[in-house]
Image: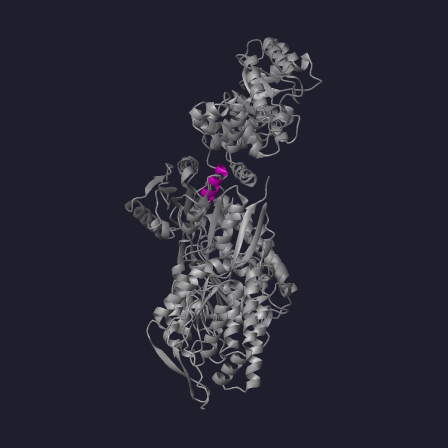
Amino acid sequence: MAGTTELTDVTRDEGALRRFLHGLPGVDAVGIEQRSAGLATRSIKKASKLRAIELAISMVDLTTLEGADTHGKIRSLCAKAKRPEAGVSHVAAVCVYPDLVATAKEALDGAPVRIASVATAFPSGRSSRQVKLADTEFAVAQGATEVDMVIDRGAFLSGRYGQVFEEIQAVKAAAGSAHLKVILETGELATYDNVRRASWLALLAGGDFIKTSTGKVSPAATLPVTNVMLQAVRDWHGVTGELRGVKPAGGIRTTKDAIRHLVAVNEVAGPEWLTPDLFRFGASSLLNDLLMQRRTQLDGHYSGPDYVTVD
Amino acid sequence: MTWEYAPAPESRAIANLKPGYRMFVDGEFVDGTGEPLKSVNPATEEVLAEVSTASAADVDKAVKAAHRAYDKTWGRMPGAERAKYIFRIARMIAERARELAVLESLDNGKPIRESRDTDVPTAAAHFFYHAGWADKLEYAGYGPDPRPLGVAGQVIPWNFPLLMAAWKIAPALACGNTVVLKPAETTPLTALVLAEIIQQAELPPGVVNIIPGAGDVGAELVNHPGVNKVAFTGSTEVGKVIQASLAGTGKKLTLELGGKAANIVFDDAPLDQAVEGIVNGIFFNQGHVCCAGSRLLVQESIAEELLDRLRARVSTLRLGDPLDKNTDIGAINSREQLTKITELVAAGEQEGAQRWTSPCPLPDKGFYFAPTVFAGVTQSMRIAREEIFGPVLSVLTFRTPEEALAKANNTPYGLSAGVWTEKGSRILWLADKLRAGVVWANTFNRFDPTAPFGGYQESGFGREGGRAGLEAYLDV
Amino acid sequence: MSDRVPVSKTYKLYLGGAFPRSESGRTYPVSDAKGRFLANAAQGSRKDLRDAVVAARGAFGGWSGATAYNRGQVIYRVAELLEGRREQFAAEVAAGEGVPSRRAESLVDTAVDRLVWYAGWTDKIAAVLGGANPVAGPYFSFSVPEPTGVVGVLAPQRSSLLGLVSVLAPVLAVGATAVVVTSQDRPLPAITLSEVLATSDVPGGVVNLLTGHTAELAPWLAAHADVNALDLTGAPAELRADLERAAAGTVKRVLRAPSTEPDWQERPDIRRLRPLLETKTVWHPMGV
């Protein structure tokens, strides 16, 4: 792994970038999947489970990214985000399309819930640089405090790493003070080696978070993919001393899944990542399952879906 | 923030622990006339149960029962019928898997995660696999009608008590032999539950006999003139004694002995998985594994980085109560073994290797040893040559593939080896040249009943598993 | 004019591809079946044996690393050369074993055929004794038979050529190397065979032949730590258990001696190949 000084060199030109990314250690697919399966056998019970559930709730980016989204839908999402249920503190953020950011801002009304907006011709990213930057600027202007961009997977898969790198940098500049989450769309990258390379590319370009998926492509977040990304931020920290975040998104629907991811955060990256500043879940239905399981922990008997609100 | 995992212990009641266990001879559980032994839970040092042991007369009875069963039933039974009995055993192990896993962890000290996910399912798989051979032996490549040998005397170690019993009994039965098996002195319990299963599966009396006891019972068994075949898994030291004692008797012998495996990591390895493989290689089952990757050979150019990653990873291993589902490292099997490990670790320090030990807390009671990594080890040190059989890794460096190969092969053992590199041709070059019975490339410690397992040189001879494993139990 | 006086041969050891005398300087007389003096044979010593093991170990890498096709051709070449010296061998066998010349010729013919049989095995052993293991996981696993290393062979005492070839050829076929103690009282065909080996393509050191007293040499061979396997076929009955015990010191693979020397003219099988082979199992993950 390169030291800090070399990292400035690796983005010097396309060739240096390619050599660096291709020089990263490979990921053995069976090995990472086996390690992930091993972590998934951790048995999290009682107080540690309740702690995990509350932590997971605080990490949720409560998301709606539908063509059918309306102002009403966004308002109810924000209400849920602010106060998931009585006695439960707010989630990390809401995540919406740019044109609904203003509605979210209004609905949240100063609550400590961040507003994430997808941008850059989400989810495919298939548009001009100009459109992507305009999309980003619009979202931020509307009040987004976090921008979830997509990388150009076509450029990445055809080896034009420099192009992907520059685009992330440009979006970062356009996003200004908003936190930038870089969606790798790991389901389209196909290999763990690519996930590792894309992770480093995004970190080199200044992404504050690396995020697995748009939620529009299957497979989305899987435990092994999240693990590879956690290894990347861990190693980035080792080289630079900086802490960057990871956001698995799409496909995490159950408390069990969420806890497995938290175990991975704890054991692969380290306990310092157990904070909404550095780990998020991009999810919609997960929140209700977390709430339901929380009830089970508190009440001492199993709860049911009619006891949590459908918003 | 810190997030502590609450204790998640498997219930000890599941083990159905009984105050006393008896030996299994001629289809019945009977009191042995040897001095009873007390099996101890190494995690707490409490006595789990009293186990009756075999005397010389009991060994004789067991061998005679096995002979009768061989002559009257098992040796004559069509393979297809034998197969069904063995399939039954496989199924019944699976049915009682949880009970067996908890009992194994209690008796042996290994983490429940391992007994549950590895030992017990693999034991069932061995019976299932071999059952299918019983009526297909003519296709095994040993001629049109390969015959069994007779009575197999089998002596197994304490590191995988149930699994080793399965490795031994399943092929013996499939090939038409009858069995007298001696489990290890410190871990007799699961073998005796297996005897219960064998009884419930209605195997004819005497086909399998299980006689607990110490080394003297093992010696009595292997030297009994009525035994036609001897299979031993254990230390090289005892293996040599058995091989010598069988000289001139004509008994067929297979030995699965010690090892000092090299785990070779090249600079182009998938590093995170290599770290996992190193950890699994040496800390699986507290390092009580004959094929443990106890010598890490790492390319000098990445040694420092790899060691940093390794130490960070080892620090996350959770040591403690074997019954806790989150325990990665359980208890050392016995005080005697703990003493041996401690002594060799002291030798490592004395000989100038740099010791690092995981800062994990150790329980107040029980036999525990924290995962330990020695850097700066040279080939001449005792910790690089002797089998420690504990959670202690010796790290050596190399510069070229040739040097790695030479160091890897520089041992009288030859059981296993690991190779980590993304370069396919280098893997195959090493796989060809490593003098070891099992070579794991970009993985470690994988076992399967279809894959022959066994050593070169002083790691023993004969194979267990696969078509090759049948040879040990056939007169061919 | 008197008849021409024949030039008789000095029989020496065959070590590392060369023909040295015993370092001990000793020889012993060899007689024919009727007790008539035939020649002086070198009486190999434990130091000769030690040198032979060094030579065999040195040759192991090359021979085991040669392609199976190549080893097959080399063994076949030995058969060709043996065939070419059929009369010489028949004469030596007839003299040493005291059999009629027709019988001796038949023994030589069978020895040639035996070499051909094993020559054909070299590139089939892996397929017949190895294979892929259908393990229950995302791994490709295969097992290959590999030569065990240096094999110490106590050659049959009675069958001086066919017996010797029958125990030596499988060692060559699997890719192991051999240190052979020849028949003590009938060593001459072995030495002539070594001339065949030396002029064939068998690399020096792959086969090392020591003439001498079996009981003197065998314990050193059985206990030698750099010998991987021991073939006791020609071991004196009273020594067999001791030799096996000595072999246990380094966990050698032992081919036990049958109670009486087998009829070497019977059809061979792979029982002599298997004990000289180690099964190596290799695993690799399958993933993208």
Q: Is residue B33 above or below residue A150?
A: below
The x, y position of residue B240, in whole percent, is 40, 63
Tell me, yes or no, whether the highlighted magenta stretch contains residue A149.
Answer: no
Give the residues in magenta: B270-280
Side of B276 relative to B356 (left or right): right
Q: Is residue A266 visible in this depiction of the protein? A: yes
Q: Is residue B110 left or right of residue A164?
A: left
Chief secondary structure of the magenta portion: helix
Q: Position of residue B74 (x, y in %)?
A: 59, 68
Choose top left, top right, bottom left or bottom right for residue A201: top right
Residue B273 falls inside the magenta stretch: yes
B160 vs B173: above or below = above
Residue A96 coordinates in the image, percent (x, y): 63, 17
Which sits in the foreground, B75 or B19? B75
Please say which color scheme the image uses.
one colour
* Nearest to the observer: residue B6 or residue A56: A56
Q: Tell me if I can see residue A253 in this picture.
A: no
Q: Residue at x 56, y 61 (%)?
A: C70
Q: Is residue B249 left or right of residue A120?
A: left
Residue B328: name its quadrant: top left
Q: Give the quadrant of the C terminus of chain B.
A: bottom right
- Occupied quadrant, residue B222: bottom left
Q: Position of residue C32 (x, y in %)?
A: 45, 86
**Vertically, is B263 above or below A140?**
below
> Relative to A130, does residue C180 appear above or below in the rendering?
below
